[in-house]
Amino acid sequence: MIPFLLRRLVQSIPTLLLASILIFFVIQLAPGDFLTPAKLNPNISEEQIAALQRNFGLDRPAWQQYLFWMGNMFQGDFGLSFQYQQPVLDIIWPRILNSLYLALMSLILYYSISIPLGVYGAVRQNSPGDNAVNVVLYFLLGFPSFFLALIVIYFILQIRNATGLDIPIGGMTSNNFEELSPFGQMLDILKHLIIPALVLAISDAAGLTRVIRGQMLEVMRSDYVRTARAKGVSERTAIWKHTFRNAILPIVAGIGGLLPALISGVGFLEVVFAYPGITPMLLTAIGTQDLYLIAGFTVITTVLLIIGNVISDILLAVVDPRVKVS
Amino acid sequence: MKKALFIALALTATSASAAPFVYPAAWTAEQNTANKRGGELRLSVLSDFKTINPFTSAEADSIPGTMVENGEFGSASLFLQDPRNDEFLPYMADAKPVVSNNGKRFVVKIRPGMKFSDGQAITADDWITTWKIHTDDKVGSNSFDNFFLNKKPITIKKIDNLTLQFDFPQVSSTAYGRMSFAPWPDHVFGKAYREGGADAIKKLWTLGTPASQIVSPGMWVLESYRAGERSVFTKNPYWGEWNKDSRGNALPYLDKLSYRVTNDANATLAAFLAGQIDQAPMRNADDLAQTKRAIDGGTLKATLLPNVSPQAQSSWITFNWNKSAEPAQQKLFRDVRFRRAMSHIANRKAMVDLALGGLGVETYSSVYPVFRQQIAAGTAAGAPRYPYNLAEASKLLAQIGYTKKNAQGYLVDKAGKVLEFNLSTNAGNTVREQLGRIFADEAKKVGVKVNFTPIDFNNLVNQLTSKGENRPFDAILLGLSGGGNVWSFGTNVTPCGGNLHSYNNPTNGACLTPQESLMTKLYYQGDAELDDAKRRAIGGQLMKVEGELQPVIYLVGGNYHVAYNERLGGEFARNMMDAFYGSRMWALSFIK
C-alpha cells in the first residue's frame, strides 16, 4: 500500500506541473487583463492604472508571474484575488463548502434513484414497469439540467401562487436564517437544497440506471450466478450479493472522478437557483479575468482529481478481490 | 457624584452643540407624517460583494459604499448635492467652508456631535487618516485619483479636532466633490496603518471579519454577510442624532436594508415581480412590459415610471486619426467634412426606435443628456448639430471628391478606390450591435461601405486606448458612463493626451487641430471656475467647438425608468428623479 501511494505521489508531480503551466497560460491567452475595463472609465487616470498594474504584478511578463505564483503555491499561498483583494483560498473555501452540500445531497439522491431502478430494470427486463421507467428517464435525459430547473421553477411558482405555500426556489437560506435555532438552520438549508438536488439527480439518473441495468443483465447470465442459483441461494442473495456486487465494479472505478466534481459544484444549476456555490463565483471571475482565482481553483480541482483516482484504485481493490493495489 | 455630574455635563454639551442636518421637506414627495418606523428595505445586487474594506473596494455596489450611502447619490461626507439644483450643502460639515488663497484653500468646520456606529465621535483625525490611506499607492485605493489635480496632490491639515484645512494645488470646480469622501474610523484604520502600513490595511475588514467588528460613519452598519446570498445592514443607532426630517424626527425610519445577490438581471426582475425585492432596475422595453403586465394582472402592487430621464451614459463612433500606414484613410478621417457626413448618416431616430424600443434620446454631444443644465448651456452657445440627412451627407462626400459610384453602388475616388472602413464594437452588447447595423445600412444608401464587426471587448478597449502614429483600428462604436454634473467633461476624454481622447492619440499626446487645443484650454478653464453659471457657459463654448469639429459622432442614449414596490414610501417628486440622483433617499424612505 505505502509503496503504491508513494509511486502515485511521484507520478503526480509532473502531471501537476504541466497542468499548472497549461492553466496559467491558457488564461493568459485571453486578450486584455483584469484592469482593461478600468481603462474605459473617464475618471481613472493612467497613473492610477499603472500603479494598480504594479500592485497586481500585471506589468511583468507572464512567465515571471507564473514563476512567482508557483513559488508562492509551494508555500501554500495561492495568491490574491484581484476582485476581492484577499487570498484565493479564503474566498473559495466557503463556496466549495456550499457546493459540497448540494453535490453530496444530489449524489445521495442520484444513487438512491438509479440503483433500485437499474436493478429493477434488469430483474424485470422489458416489463411494463421497466419500459415506463426507461421512457421517463430518457425523456429527462434529453433536457439540459438547467432547462429542467427552469421548468421546475415555473411550476413551483404556479403552485406558490395557487396555494400560498412558501416553497423556496432559490438561494441557500431563508431571510430569517440568522434568527433560527441551529436545528432550524439545518432544516432551512435542507429545504433549499432538496429541489435543486432532486432536479440534478433525476436528470442524471438515466445514464447510471442504464449502466447498472446493462451490467446486471450481463452478470446475471454468467456461469457463477447460474451456479449460485443451482446451489439454491435465495433470489435476494443471488441478485444483491452475486450479481450487484460484480455489476457495480465499473461504477466504483469511476468514483474517483466524483471528488473534483463534488467541489466544482453543479454548474449552471447553481446559477439558475441563485445558489451561492462555486459556479456563479467562478463565472464572475472568468468574466473579470481574475487570474489567480481561476488558476487557484483549477489547481485545486486538478489535485483532487489525482487524489480521487488514488481513492478509486484503493476502493476497487476493496470491492474486487482480484485487484491488488501494489 | 462626580460621575453623575460628568454625565449631566456631557449630556448638556452634546445637546447644546449638536445641530442636526435637517432634510428639507421638498426632498420627498411623500412625507412620513404618520411617523411610520421600522421595516426592511429589500434590494438586490447582481454579483456578490467582494470586500468590506473601504480602501481596497473597487466595485460600483460595495459593502462600505452601502454603509455610508443614502440612495443613489450622496453619502456620509462633508458636502451633499441638492438634487433640486445641484448645489453643495454642508452635511458632515457644520457650515459652508471659508475659502481663501484665491479659491485654493478651504477651511471646513466639522459638524459636532456625530458618532460612528460604535459610539466614538467622528473627528478631524478620521478624515486625515482616510486621506492618508487613500493616497498610499501601495494600498491601491480606487479613490486615489480623487486626491490629485493634474498629478499634484491635494493636502489636508488638521487645525483642531473639528476643523480641517484643504489646500488645492490649483483652483478646481470639483473641489466640493473631492472634499466629499467618507471618513473611516481612525481608531480602527489609523492604528493599523501606523503600525503595519499598507499591508496591515489590506488585511483589515475582509469578508471573514465578524460583522460585530465593523464600524460605520454612515446610516447603515453591516449586520450579517452570507457569501453569494445576502448582506443585511442595520441602522447606525447614533446616526439619527444628527440626521432629522423636517419635523425634527430622527432618521432613518427604516430598521434594516438587505441586499440579495441575484447573479443575473433576469433573476432580479423575477424577484421584483414576485414581490421579494422592493426596487429593480428597468433595463429595456421588455422589462417595462413584464412589470406593467404584472401590475395590470394584479399580481404585483408597484409604481412604474417609464422614461423618467435620459441615462448618464453615451454611445458614439470614433474615427482613428493616427493611421500613418494608410495615408489616404488618415486624410479622410481627419477631414471634418467626412465626419460631419457621418453624423448626417447616423439615423438616430431609427436607432432609438429599433435598438432602444423607442425608450431613448438622440444625442449630439459628449455631455450626457441627463445633465440638462449643461446641455442647455451648449444649446445657448450655439453648438451645431448634424442630424440625419442623407442628401447633406452625399453633398459633403462629393466635396471631398467622392462623386462617382461603382457597379455595386459604392462611392469611389478618382483612382477607383471604394469609400470603405471597418467599424468595430464589443461582441455581446446587443444594443451596440444594432446601432452599428443601422449605421452601416444607412451608410450603404449614400454609397459608403461600412464593414461592421463586433469583436472581443478587451481587444476593443486595447485598440481604442492604444497610443502611437499608427493605431490598429479604423472606427469604433462604444459608449462611456461615469462622471459628475459639476463639470461634465471627462478628464481623460476632452484634453489632448488623455487615454480616452480616442480619435487622436499620438505618442507625444499633442493636439492636431486648433479646435482640440481650444477644447483642452476651455476644459482646464472651466475646471478652474468656481461659479456655476460661468462654468456652464465655458462648457457651452466647449460644446460648440466640439460640435463643429465632430471628433466623435454621438448617437443615442437610453432612458432611465423607475419601478418600486407599493409598500415603499418617501420617494422623490417625479421632477426630482433622474438617472444621476436616482428616485429616493434611503433616509426618507419608509415602509407603509
Image: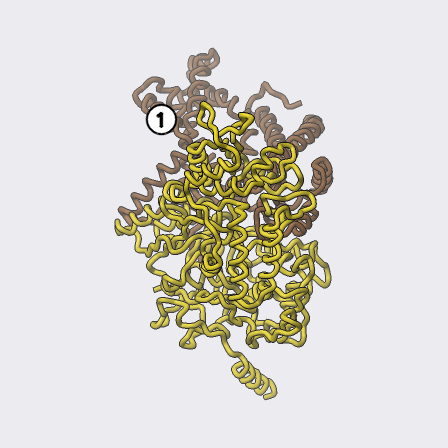
Chain colours: A brown, B yellow
- Residue A291: give x, y in percent of width and height: 62, 40
| Residue shown at the point (42%, 22%) measured from the top left | A210
Residue B172 screen position, x and y as percent:
61, 64
Q: Amino acid at mark 1?
A: Phe
Q: Specify whether A197 is left or right of B202.
A: left
| Residue under the image location 58 percent in, 34 percent down | B329
| Left or right of B83, for residue B499 | right
Instruction: Using the rendered view, name the quadrant where residue B305 is placed.
Output: bottom left
Q: Tell me the quarter of the image containing the C terminus of chain B.
A: bottom left
Give the SS element for disc 1.
Answer: helix
Q: Quadrant of residue B248?
A: bottom left
Q: Tag 1, which chain?
A: A
| Relative to B120, A275 lies left or right | left
Q: Residue at x 66, y 66 (%)?
A: B168
Q: Image height check: is B201 above or below B478? A: below
How many numbered circles does the render carry?
1
Tell which of B485 and B121 is nearer to you.
B485
Disc 1 packing (10 Å; few <14; some 14–19; many ≥20): few
Q: Position of residue A97 (x, y in %)?
A: 54, 43
Q: Position of residue A118 (x, y in %)?
A: 41, 24
Left or right: B206 in relation to B316: right
Label 1 sits on residue: A139
